[in-house]
Amino acid sequence: MSTEAIAAEKPKRNYNALFGLTLLALLVLLWIILSVSTQSFASANNISNLLRQGSMIAILAVGQTFVIITGGIDLSVGAVVGFATVIAAMLINAGVPVFLAILITLLVGVAIGMFHGFGIVKMGLPPFIITLATLTSLRGIGLLMTNGNSISINNDAFQEFSRNSFVGVPNLFWMVILVGIPAYIFLHHSRWGRYLFSVGSNAEASRLSGVNVQRTIYMAYTLSGLCAAFVGVLLASRIGIGNPTQAEGWELQAIASSVIGGTSLFGAVGSVHGPLLGAFILATINNGANLLNVNAFWQRIITGALIIIIVYFDGLRRRGK
Amino acid sequence: MTSTAQELHPHPTLEPGRTILELKGLEKRYPGTHALKPVNLAFKSGEIHAIVGENGAGKSTLIKLLTGVMPRTSGDVIWEGKPATLATPHEAMALGINAVHQEVVLCRHLTVAANMFLGEEDSRFGILQQRAMVREAQKIIDGLGFDLPAHVVLGDLTIGQQQLIAAARATVRGTKFLIFDEPTAYLTRKEADQLFTLIRRLKGEGVTIIYISHRMEEVFELADRVSVLRDGTLVGTRNIAETNDAELVKMMINRSIEQVYHKEHFTPGAMIVETRNLSGKGFENVSMSVRAGEIVGLYGLIGAGRSEFVTTLYGRHRKSAGQILWEGKEVQVNSEHDAIRLGMALAPESRRDQGLCLNLPVGLNLNLPIYKRISRNMLISGAKEKAEADRQIADLRIKTPTRGALASSLSGGNQQKIVIGKWLAHGAKLFIFDEPTVGVDVGTKAEIYRLFGALLSKGAGIILISSYLPEVYELADTLHVFRRGKLVATHGFRSADHEEILSQALAEKQEKKGGQT
């Protein structure tokens, strides 16, 4: 019986790895189809553009995944991005050195994440509620600070960063790697990563095993806030303005990317590479649809249908286990 | 009461002694496992038929097949002379086959009445007849002799009371064949007695009862016949009058009963922990101590304050008064973290709610308390992580395909080994085991008891909480009896008899004397 069990276990593992590969395969398949069916897809210009488009959602999705693994949700990330563009723009225009301005903006993201942790751990609010509350109020605070106007950033070096490339790859995509590698090590090779999973699976069992559950929750939301603020800096650089209404609906794209990438909204299941692939699949669909002149309204419908299909098959795979 | 009962159970009187359900070569295979080897067995109406066996022996599989939760691989089920497919739970229920599960599967947020009529609500023109349903439910509950209100929310009742409601629910649906899966695991003695009364009454009405339990005395108290499963095979069926404890245990595990309670005696060493007049939520004024090499048993009914006492000791809840002395020095235990750092380990009562991360791998569960030790600068050493998990799996003989299998895929006994195993890897001076053998088979029990001996020999102390008297009686060097949040009596190893301890836990005599203490 034991040999049977061992034999049965091996394909299961491959199956798991296979799913990571199926997402990658899906992405490659989309690229091949689009390269063949359109003239402009495979152009260096368009690929760079695609990577830029996907990068920001990808970074948001990584932060979001940490939160979802603990069994929570962070609806505020889009608003944090918009708010961070305002903070960064104001600081840079006030003559604060760019480096310092970025650092302060990131700290603002950390503070927002800490506040979420506080609301959940100390006030006992559901994650959905506290992050929904900050979603609306951050937009409001941003609008108050800017009087509803956009702030143009007068710093060319700051803006050039997002347009430039390094060894042929857009800087924005390098930022995904900059975030992705530490995030991967953190989630899969550090004990804090294990604690995220254990808290998402069973908080009480984790607590009784000596895991600091409160600190783990603080950490997840802080990292999500940090990722969002970082994306805000990148967005400010890309569009050259600070505007609190930017990044509307990005939280949903981030959640969708995460879920397409195999994260379970019930917690305790997720990875770093999954959401990254998910984000670039979504970006490819949008990019390709534009090139194929698909009606923008249809693009939304297709994206929605795709989320249902991918997550359904993922569910089948899980139940199959 | 009998007349109301007849009104309430309108199903046709079944002719007792007639074969109602027959299994012919019933078989179930899962990929990689032969969970149930062909079983031939006939159940008669009006009999209480106990099914016993170790965890993983095939009892759950048999229930799942009979209730239509899972399809069989081969074989026939003959219901009242006709073959039944039992493809869906609905079909099983329509025939009159129902089950009451160990864990209550009802809606905690709905009222007792709403739960009783769930799925067959009384409505007029689409509007629920709520008051009528509450009245009807109350009538049924009163008729069964349960002293419970029908209008309260189910979650406000104790788990034992919820179990009674689950049983009551099963009886109102024209049930002819009712399966109880370890119904008394979380019941107090009084609740268990009420349940037994209900079961006997159903039997009197011709209902066939399948009673699954690990508790032998219940089997002998209730059953007419008993079938033993081992490794998916039906070992045999006996009339209860023609068998005994020893024979059944031997059939179940192929081993004699004396080998189960494994007790090693050590000379008590240094004091590990002492509480002085400790009070907290659910218990008050508890003074006790644990020495190295000693098992201190806490016996009492569920809800007597034992679990509350140990979780407070462990820092999960705040104490309201009293002192905790650790190795002679007073300490403040404000969190589980403090307790673990001092050298305590707690294997909690409920594996599902407190013990395990069920949808995570076995290895992660085993290593959860020791990730600090097996990582350097935040990064986990992959090799150490694997080695630690594999060592515990091998040492405790946890039956799992790999350390990567999900904890939920293991049987109850093996899950319990994980709960214990994670603390063995961590190490501790004081091990607290809260109901370590609930839902665990005899073979695993023996392994767990042997483990206690190994821990004691290394100079650890153990607090053992159990609602199962033979367990604490045979194992504890010092036995404390809890009743209603108070420590009411203390005995040495086997220094009092079962009846005395039981009456102290129940305290019927003391209560009759009226308010002396």
Image (spheres, rainbow, N blue to C red):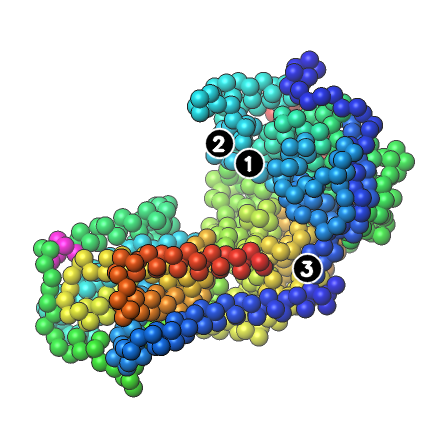
- The answer to whether the residues at label 1 and label 2 have Cβ atoms under 8 Å apart is yes
Quadrant housing residue B77? top right
Comparing B94 with A190, the one in front is B94
Magenta residues (range): A142-146
Quadrant housing residue A7? bottom right
Q: Is residue A265 visible?
A: yes
- At label 3, which amino acid type do we have? Pro
Q: What residue does disc 3 label?
A: B31
**Separation of residues labelled 3 and 2 (CA atoms):** 38 Å
Q: Quadrant of the C terminus of chain A?
A: bottom right
Q: Chain of mark 1?
A: B
Q: What residue does disc 2 label?
A: B110
Residue B159 is left or right of residue A263, and the answer is: right
Q: How many tags in the picture?
A: 3
* Nearer mark to the viewer, of 3 and 2: 3
Q: What residue does disc 1 label?
A: B106
